[in-house]
Image (tube, rainbow, N blue to C red):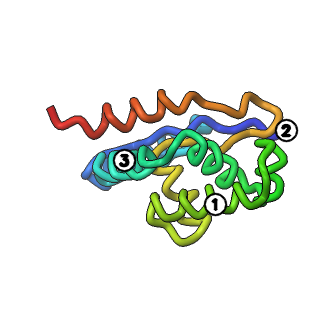
Amino acid sequence: MKELKPIVFVVDDDQSVRMSLVDLLAREDYAVETFASAAEVVESRARLAKLTPREFEVFRWIIAGLLNKEIGAEMGVTLRTIKRHRAQVMQKTGVVSVVELVRLALKAGIAPVQPGIASRVPYTAHRGMAKQFSNTD
């Protein structure tokens, strides 16, 4: 199985700083995602925080590239249930395609499920991250 590269998120409003950091990190073999502002990350995480734990689990299987019937087999639920969860994920996150869902996951720093490896990331930890980044105190 292919080993995943660590992803580094670079957030800065100065494009020259972002590009310099991207070059430096790329030389060290890191995958890099850049954002002009932290608002993009916060907004992405807030959208994902709307999901129930089960919807979040389906979301991670979707961004891993599995078909509905494959997700159902992995989770031990019916195809109809997966279709319902998938529709809720799309509606709650405000996306219309899987490509947009993957982009949203990247911005939020959420990794897809890796079949064969522990498939569940504690959802409460994810919700805590969203609260941490959305707290305006």
Q: Nearer the viewer, mark 1 or mark 3?
A: 1
Do the numbered discs 1 and 3 sit on residues whose CB atoms are within 8 Å?
no
Dot 2 or dot 1, earlier in sequence: 2
The picture quadrant where one finds residue 111 is top right
The picture quadrant where one finds residue 80 is bottom right
Count of labels shown? 3
Tag 3: residue type? Ala
Q: Residues within 10 Å of mark 1 (few under 14, many from 20)?
A: few
Q: Label for residue 46?
A: 3
Q: Residues within 10 Å of mark 3 (few under 14, many from 20)?
A: some
Q: Position of residue 108 (x, y in %)?
A: 45, 46
Dot 3 or dot 2, earlier in sequence: 2
**Helix, strand or loop under label 1:** helix
Residue situated in front as seen by the camera: 63 or 85: 85
Q: Report which residue position mark 1 lands on.
A: 84
Dot 1 or dot 3, earlier in sequence: 3
Do the numbered discs 3 and 2 sit on residues whose CB atoms are within 8 Å?
no
Q: Residue at x 54, y 57 (%)?
A: 89
Q: Position of residue 79 (x, y in %)?
A: 78, 58
Do the numbered discs 2 and 1 sit on residues whose CB atoms are within 8 Å?
no
Quadrant including the C terminus: top left
Q: Report which residue position mark 2 lands on.
A: 1
Q: Nearer the viewer, mark 2 or mark 1?
A: 1
**Helix, strand or loop under label 3:** helix
Tag 1: residue type? Arg
**Helix, strand or loop under label 2:** loop
Q: Residues within 10 Å of mark 2 (few under 14, many from 20)?
A: few
